[in-house]
Image: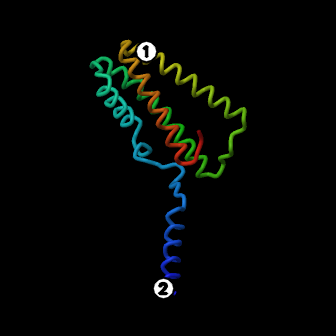
Amino acid sequence: MKRFAVVLALLTTLGVAAQRNNGPCMPRGQKMNMTAEEMATMQTKHMTLALDLTEAQQKKVMQLHLEEAKLRKARWEEMDKLRASGDWKRPTDEERLARQNARLDEQIAFQAKMKEVLNDEQYQSWKDMRRQKAKFGRKKMQERGRRG
């Protein structure tokens, strides 16, 4: 009987430890609580440290990041309002395609603006940093069992 109890305890422990823990689907970190100006400042400072930007470059990059952060913040707030009101519906294929095209157009425009501000070496480093960040994001989504 004692052995049976020990085996049962071990199997129960193993069963509990083997359960998959995905955690929250969409973690909301501090970035969601930041203002657009704070997000832009943080991004600019990170880039300054990584790429050794000059004072003039910092101001131009800050403006670019501020525009992007305001747009992102507006989209987040719009989506939160839709979800809170219960009016949110899964987008159709055409809507999804239109959003992806618009997002890619914005990214191309942002990349062109960054190319104007940064010198060749900084621009290459910036592209490498973005590539690494995207790679890491895909890896994290796969770990959470989401897309990718």
Foreground disc of the pair 2, 1 = 2
Q: Amino acid at mark 2?
A: Lys
Q: Quadrant of the C terminus?
A: top right
Classify residue 16 as left or right of residue 85: left
Q: Position of residue 143 (x, y in %)?
A: 52, 46
Q: Quadrant of residue 53?
A: top left
Q: Which mark is residue 50?
A: none
Q: Residue at x 53, y 43 (%)?
A: 141
Classify residue 21 as left or right of residue 100: left
Relative to 87, does residue 132 appear above or below in the rendering? above
Q: Which mark is residue 115?
A: 1
Q: Residue at x 51, y 19 (%)?
A: 109
Q: Residue at x 68, y 44 (%)?
A: 90
Q: Position of residue 55 (x, y in %)?
A: 27, 19
Count the labels in the image. Answer: 2
- Residues packed near mark 1 inside 10 Å, few (<14), some (14 to 19) or many (20 plus): some
**Quick one: SS at disc 2?**
helix
Q: Quadrant of residue 63?
A: top left
Classify residue 121 as left or right of residue 106: left
Q: Label 2, label 1: how many angstroms apart (C-alpha)? A: 72 Å
Relative to 138, does residue 104 appear above or below in the rendering? above
Q: Amino acid at mark 1?
A: Lys
- Residues packed near mark 2 inside 10 Å, few (<14), some (14 to 19) or many (20 plus): few
**Quick one: SS at disc 1?**
helix
* Residue picked out by circle 2: 2
- Counting residues from the start of the chain, the first of labels 2 and 1 encountered is 2
